[in-house]
Image (spheres, helix red, strand yellow):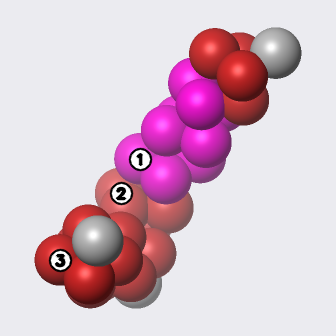
Amino acid sequence: MENTNSIYTLHMTTPTGVAFAVSTISTATTTTL
């Protein structure tokens, strides 16, 4: 979990990472709903 958190935080510091995070969250939300 800590490893995933670190990678996620690192991604959030870059524009590409932000886009990746948004896409991941959108997919997770769609799957949840």
- The amino acid beneath tag 3 is Asn
Q: Residue at x 41, y 47 (%)?
A: 20
Which structural element holds mark 2? helix
Separation (CA) of disc 3 from disc 1: 17 Å
Separation (CA) of disc 2 from disc 3: 19 Å
Give the residues drawn in magenta, as a range: 20-28
Residue named by callout 3: 3
Sooner in the amino-acid sequence: mark 3 or mark 1: 3
Observer-side mark, 3 or 1, equals: 3
Instruction: Give the quadrant of the C terminus.
Output: top right
Q: Are marks 2 and 3 in contact (CB under 8 Å)?
A: no
Residue named by callout 2: 16
Sooner in the amino-acid sequence: mark 2 or mark 3: 3
Horizontal and vertical percent position of residue 17: 37, 62
Q: Is residue 33 left or right of residue 18?
A: right
- The amino acid beneath tag 1 is Phe
